[in-house]
Image (cartoon, coloured by chain):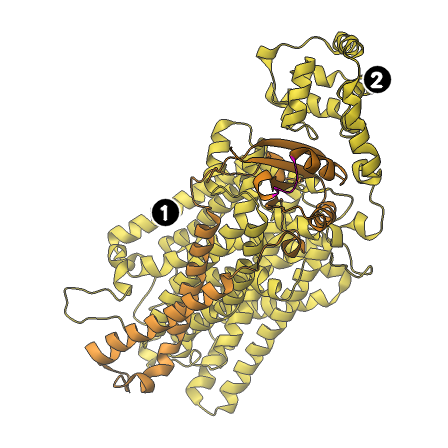
């Protein structure tokens, strides 16, 4: 049987947070929350883990740093050492001070872009990707909870509806669960 | 939720809801541009095209078309470059440094100042490229394997550091800016009515949907990018200053240059932000979001950085005397009293004296005065670069080669032209991009919005105020009203508002408060068009509520009739 999903709509960030807390206490699993801006404090309630994007940035930064040093050592020390204005390039260490600016820039370049690309890929947000927010107003002033029936096998659809209606809900809708992307 | 001290001035004036913020920002994108926009765009385009003409002439004929000579071999080209890079500093400073310091007032201005940064760095980047003389071999600045044997670029040269610094700065700023833009493009996409706009904004928004996990990542990515961009901002202008400071020209080789240039860049950047935003807020009616307090904050930054610049000028003078190097001393005496004394005097007046006026609260809170000073600072900072560059070299070690610099019309045309091109970009941005970070402003609404701070918020939404358990489930049951009763009511309702036609159906979901479910219900009753909804009054709302039995009072509260009227006018 195809999975079905309930979209419960709220019109305030604090209200949806309280509702989520109440529902989770009841044992309901909330798959996702769509909101027009980040709701602070909702992640631990619905069980969204802390992102590892920071680590990604660090790894990319390290890559950039290494590449810059390896590159400059090859260009300026190994391949064609030059005596420029009395500042000879005979070893990496001696010449390091004048390599610092580009090493720094390259580190930032790699960390920034590496993280941004990872971010876009992980979010599946790329040019031409379809949007999958359940209602156009979730990018304006509505907050929607996504509750999938397959993840809440302890409850029937009716039970979930009743439970949701006990929260300060604005609109509720049940439909086939479709994976858009 | 984060609470903010009550004595802090609110950042958003009046009462705004989340929807109001969306409306206020999207209004100018969705509506027609005012005549003033077309006039400004036309002027900017003409000037920009003239500038492009001058650049083409320069490329076709050669650098000889500039007023450079044997002694002054670097003048307006590098002056304009440093001027534009300096302007390009405020944006990332506002979005990155102020983000790290949790300055919430930045949210109203970060988007526009980042846009300014990016366009300003475009303009800056143009100058080194065209001043190579052979634009088409511009890629030679990169360390690429080539047919000349092991001929690599010189990694010891600050000019090459500049290449890396500027391009990193430009691309990282662009990424930072765009990642913030994605959710706001999504907002516009979901509101767009014309299929073309919808298509364009859905491509621009990359399919952003606002999932909790995505927002979680969004916040960390913004924070890390801010952390990366902060040292980047400082490094970029430090490296620009190395172009001069690592030389052995008196007046240039000063160790104070890096911090002094960075302060000067922030100074000029904030001045440009003021110039642009004071016009923008007026033209786009964003006074509630960018108000006197924001302007005052920026003026304080201008005052502080202006004072740093002033101290740097005086330190330079002192050091030239204290060093005991007569060439060094001469460079500064010549600056102040030589043939370019007027440039030095205007630099000192514009950059040292004018920001000191900001100590007066009345002046720094005056929008007109701020606008005036921001222009003065922009002019002053251009003169600063001119003074540093031209007056240091125009009288060199050999008096027989002393000369003056006279700009040709190509010099002037290219400089004015970049201002034109910059405004072409900026006006297009103001027209088609969300000029306020919609999603970020929403996050501070409850902590810094005026009506939320002094508890004058009109009762937000009765759905929340009424005990939900009492209303929602029981009222749902009323949908089991007897069928005869219902059909009678439906016909009396349709009598009043007129029968609808399914073929001329409007998208009722556009009415705030109507979702797909409710639209279906309305269609089942026989309500299909905005026209029908617009005729509804209190009596019809009550009738409707008794038929559908869902969400009582909702239609009245959201004022469907007025919304429908507006939508009717839009679709016509």
Q: Examine the rendering and report whether any part of residue B129 can be seen.
A: yes
Q: Residue furthest bottom?
A: B324
Residue nearer the viewer, B334 or A75: A75
Residue A115 in the image, given as x and y percentages of width and height: 45, 59
Q: Which residues are magenta?
A: A152-156
Counting the numbered discs, the total is 2
Please determine whether, in this image, residue B352 is positioned above or below residue B512.
below
Label 1 environment density (alpha carbons within 10 Å; few <14, some 14–19, many ≥20): some
At a point 46% along the width and 47% down the height, the residue shown is A124
Identify the chain drawn in yellow.
B
Q: Specify the subunit that label 1 lies on.
A: B
Q: Is residue B122 left or right of residue B313?
A: left
Contact check, label 2 and label 1, Cβ < 8 Å: no
Task: Tell me the residue that label 2 is attached to.
Answer: B539
Q: Main secondary structure of the magenta part?
A: loop
Label 2 environment density (alpha carbons within 10 Å; few <14, some 14–19, many ≥20): few
Residue nearer the viewer, A89 or B178: B178
Disc 2 or 1, which lies upstream in sequence?
Answer: 1
* Image quadrant assignment for residue B94: bottom right
At a point 54% along the width and 69% down the height, the residue shown is B264
Identify the chain drawn in orange.
A
- Helix, strand or loop at label 2? It is helix
Q: Examine the rendering and report whether any part of residue B459 can be seen.
A: no
Residue B388 in the image, given as x and y percentages of width and height: 46, 72
Residue nearer the viewer, B569 or B226: B226
Please determine whether, in this image, residue B463 is positioned above or below residue B322.
above
- Residue B90's label in the rendered image is none
- Helix, strand or loop at label 1? It is helix
* Image quadrant assignment for residue B97: bottom right
- Residue B52's label in the rendered image is 1
Q: Is A9 included in the stretch rendered in magenta?
A: no
């Amino acid at each position: 049987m195809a999975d079905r999903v309930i979209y419960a709509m709220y019109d305030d960030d604090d209200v949806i947070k309280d509702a989520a807390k109440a529902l989770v206490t009841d044992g309901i699993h909330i798959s996702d929350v769509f909101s027009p801006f980040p709701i602070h404090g909702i992640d631990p309630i619905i069980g969204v883990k802390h992102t590892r994007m920071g680590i990604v940035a660090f790894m990319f930064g390290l890559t950039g740093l290494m590449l810059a040093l390896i590159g400059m050592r090859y260009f300026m020390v190994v391949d064609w050492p030059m005596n420029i204005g009395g500042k000879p390039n005979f070893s990496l260490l001696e010449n390091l001070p004048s390599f610092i600016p580009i090493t720094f820039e390259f580190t930032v370049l790699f960390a920034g872009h590496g993280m941004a690309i990872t971010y876009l890929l992980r979010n599946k947000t790329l040019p031409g990707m379809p949007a999958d927010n359940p209602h156009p107003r979730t990018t304006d002033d509505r907050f929607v909870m996504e509750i999938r029936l397959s993840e809440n096998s302890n409850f029937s659809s009716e039970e979930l509806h009743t439970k949701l209606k006990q929260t300060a809900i604005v609109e509720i809708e049940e439909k086939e669960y479709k994976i858009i992307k | 939720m984060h609470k903010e001290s009550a004595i802090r001035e609110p950042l958003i004036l009046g009462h705004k809801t989340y929807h109001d913020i969306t409306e206020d920002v999207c209004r100018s994108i969705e509506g027609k541009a005012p005549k003033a926009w077309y006039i400004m765009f036309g002027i900017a385009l003409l000037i920009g095209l003239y500038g492009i003409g001058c650049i083409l002439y320069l490329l076709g004929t050669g650098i000889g078309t500039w007023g450079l000579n044997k002694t002054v071999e670097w003048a307006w080209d590098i002056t304009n470059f440093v001027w534009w890079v300096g302007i390009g500093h405020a944006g990332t400073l506002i979005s990155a440094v102020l983000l790290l310091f949790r300055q919430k007032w930045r949210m109203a201005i970060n988007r526009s100042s980042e846009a300014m940064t990016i366009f300003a760095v475009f303009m800056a980047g143009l100058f080194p490229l065209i001043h190579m003389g052979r634009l088409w071999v511009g890629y030679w600045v990169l360390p690429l394997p080539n047919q000349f044997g092991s001929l690599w670029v010189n990694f010891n040269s600050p000019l090459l550091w500049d290449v890396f610094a500027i391009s990193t700065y430009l691309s990282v700023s662009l990424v930072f800016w765009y990642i913030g833009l994605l959710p706001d493009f999504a907002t516009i996409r979901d509101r767009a009515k014309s299929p073309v706009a919808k298509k364009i904004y859905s491509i621009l928004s990359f399919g952003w949907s606002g999932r909790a996990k995505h927002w979680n990542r969004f916040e960390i990515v913004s924070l890390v990018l801010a952390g990366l961009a902060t040292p980047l901002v400082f490094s970029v202008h430090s490296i620009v200053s190395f172009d001069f400071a690592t030389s052995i020209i008196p007046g240039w080789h000063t160790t104070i240059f890096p911090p002094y240039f960075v302060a000067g860049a922030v100074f000029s950047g904030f001045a440009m932000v003021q110039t642009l935003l004071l016009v923008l807020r007026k033209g786009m009616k964003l006074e509630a979001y960018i108000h006197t307090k924001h302007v005052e904050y920026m003026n304080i930054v201008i005052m502080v950085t202006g004072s740093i610049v002033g101290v740097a000028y005086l330190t330079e003078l002192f050091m030239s005397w204290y060093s005991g190097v007569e060439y060094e001393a001469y460079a500064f005496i010549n600056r102040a009293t030589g043939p370019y004394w007027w440039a030095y005097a205007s630099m000192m007046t514009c950059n040292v004296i004018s920001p000191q006026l900001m100590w007066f609260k009345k002046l720094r809170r005056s929008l007109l005065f701020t606008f005036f000073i921001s222009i003065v600072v922009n002019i002053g900072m251009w003169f600063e670069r001119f003074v540093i560059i031209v007056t240091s070299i125009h009288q060199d070690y050999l008096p027989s080669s002393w000369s003056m610099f006279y700009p040709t019309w190509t010099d002037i045309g290219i400089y004015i032209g970049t201002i034109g091109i910059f405004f072409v970009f900026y006006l297009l941005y103001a027209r088609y991009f969300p000029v306020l970070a919609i999603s970020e402003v929403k996050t501070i609404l409850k902590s810094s919005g005026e009506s939320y701070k002094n508890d004058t918020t009109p009762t937000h939404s009765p759905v929340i105020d009424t005990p939900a358990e009492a209303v929602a489930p029981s009222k749902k049951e009323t949908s089991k009203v007897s069928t005869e009763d219902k059909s009678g009511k439906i016909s009396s309702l349709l009598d009043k508002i007129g029968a609808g036609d399914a073929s001329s159906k409007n998208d009722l979901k556009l009415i705030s408060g109507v979702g797909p479910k409710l639209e279906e219900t309305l269609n089942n009753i026989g309500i299909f068009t905005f026209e029908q909804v617009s005729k509804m009054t209190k009596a019809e709302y009550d009738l409707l509520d008794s038929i559908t039995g869902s969400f009582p009072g909702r239609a009245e509260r959201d004022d469907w009739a007025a919304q429908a009227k507006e939508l009717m006018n839009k679709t016509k």
